[in-house]
Amino acid sequence: MLQLQHLKKYYASQKAVDDISLHVQKGSIYGLLGPNGAGKSSLLRMVTGITIPDEGKIIFNDETYSPLIHNKHIGYMPEERGLYKKMKVGEQTLYLAQLKGLEKIEAMKKINFWFTKMDMNNWWNKKVEDLSKGMSQKLQFVITIIHDPLLLILDEPFSGLDPINSEIIKQEIFQLANNGTTILFSTHRMEQVEEICKEIALVNKGKLILQGEVKNIKNQFKKNQYKLVIDQDLNGFENNIISKKDFEYVLQFSDIEASKSVLKHCLQNNFHVYSFQEIYPSLNEIFIQQVADASGSRQFIN
Amino acid sequence: MKKIWLIIKREYLTRVRKKSFIVTTLLVPLLMFGLISLFVYMAVKIETKQKLVVQDDSGNFINQIDTVQKLYSIVYEKKQLNESTQAILERTKADIFLHIFKVTDSKPDSVHIYKEGGVSLSAKEFITGQLDEIYQLKLLQDAGINKNTIDSIQHSNIQLKSFDLKDNKETNAEIASGIGYAMGIIIYMVIFIYGAGVMRGVMEEKTNRIAEVIISSVKPFQLMMSKIIGIALVGLTQFVMWSCLLTILQLLIPFLIPGFSESIQGGMPANINVSNQMEALSKNENIGLIQSVMNQNWLLIISCFLFYFLGGYFLYAAMFAAVGSLVNEDPQEAQQLTLPVTMPIILGFVIMITSLKDPNGALSVFGSLFPLTSPIVMMARIPYGVPAWQLITSMLLLIGGFIFMTWLSAKIYRTGILMYGKKPSWKEVIKWIKYS
């Protein structure tokens, strides 16, 4: 669906995007992670045609990306969100839908559909400045997807959202992906990524650090640590125990085979095993570990 | 193309539908009209004369000062014994006390004027004018010249008519400068009002953070130009409405204020004690005035006005758009950043004032060719007649300047509109121009 090949964008004072290549599959939800200032927004701006890459290529649906041709298939919600405050909700939605290339009649149909679905029908004549923050974010999301984009690009879609709206939008994202929309979004909130994305890319200082399916990445960074909960003291594994709290143990083994010995031991001694599970690192931990050696988030060339 | 049209439509409609637009469009002509009517009314009707008390020790001026004029009522009075100036002012309830001493030839301070708070310039002018005239008359009479002779000399003046060499039509410098001044001011105001409108529009898009949403649908340049065109249409609408309203109001005057037009026409000449001959002459003069207004090449003036109106607006609107794209939330920033844009406008205004006096001087010619000042300065020169080559060069330079400025502004705008946070320095802006 979307391929980025060796994208580079240098600004006068910093390398915002430094040789990044990605491949986003059709219908997938792809998360772009990185600390603030890592170059996520710069990357997304190139994919939406707002800025032009200094080097590299963007392939959209097997064609070289051109904003004029492809932008009508892209829905983009920037990090800096906003609408005309003094304009009425209905008029504004219609205007922005038409700017995306929809005909007026078609646009009205779509607006009615989404306004009904999102329970916004009585907003039509309200001014944007009269909406609450949550309401205007919902409106912004509807405006982003009003023209049924094939590719949805969301820059920090959950920042500033309350839990209720956050959930609504998450559900919409799932539904859209099920219907075949490809979604590329950036965030610095890891817990959401684990919930939503199948694939991620980790960016720092304009460079791609990690990329792949969440499951594989976690496997790659796992430390063969296990959590065991039993009903008695565990003896004979003193070298493996990292921490102990009541009868809850965190154990370190050299590999999977070694970890089985402790289960065997428990069964032989007829312990009651409440739980035994491998501890996967959270993306957060991986993220922090990967980014930790960077002292500042941006590298300035001067 | 369709998107550009959509944006122009939005820019136009949101502005025209605003209450403030409707109010100013209706109110400005009414206000202008009211103000002018008030002036005329005051000049004609209200007579609050100041009381001028004259003590003439010389005896040369007594009962000689013009009493027909409407500003001062004149009373001749003498100080009583040991009376102070303050006291006589109070006693006679005078506003101004004029003390003329016995004139011994060439004594410099032979006349004193007293007024609480100092004497105004106009009062001083009036008094010196009167005294000079009377004194000169007396001297002439003293020299043995017959009074009738003096009168006839005084009332004779040379009628001057000037003609344009090209078409032998009568020209009139006053009229030309009047028209030039009015046109120059209008363009000056247009640039300021609507240019600032463009800037505010851009700032709105930037501070509301909607620019990025729109830029993902249309090119920044399209957005900028559509906005500029949309606002230009708003300006033209307002102008057309104003001219219509003013015309209608003008037609309504006789009904609204009965006796208004007579008082304007009758007001002034009636008070100046002129002979019938003079009246006839002034009527002739009026006809001549109208004729020389008509003699102006209105086709040229109006088409040039439209050209410079639009050219000046587009040139500056692009610059204002660029400035607007640099501003963050802080309105103070806007003020600092607009300085480089407003300076040349004000410079143009200053040059225009000079060129009204000297329309073909080096500064005027330069000002009317230089694109940043030419819309204002050239308009002031046109009623006087401008060589064709200068007009063509000026127009070409303005078009060139407009294209260059738009190109430059678009580069700044493109980057600026998406930059949030710190106010960029001019050094950074130059970098954007170079790299984008």
Image: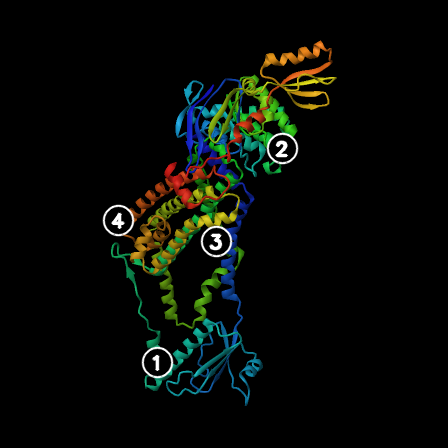
> Mark 2 to mark 4: distance in Å?
63 Å
Numbered circle sitting on residue A300:
none
Does residue B318 appear in the picture of this structure?
no
Measured Cα–Cα span from mark 4 to mark 3: 39 Å
Name the residue carrying label 4: B389
- In this view, the residue in front, A71 or B288, is A71
The kind of residue tagged 1 is Asn
Where residue A86 sits, quadrant-wise, is top right
Report the chain holding disc 1.
B
* Residue under the image location 68 percent in, 18 percent down: A228
Q: Label 3 lies in what chain?
A: B
| Same subunit, tags 2 and 3 | no
Say the numbered circle drawn on residue B250.
3
The residue beneath circle 1 is: B148
Q: Amino acid at mark 4?
A: Trp
Q: Are marks 3 and 1 on the same chain?
A: yes
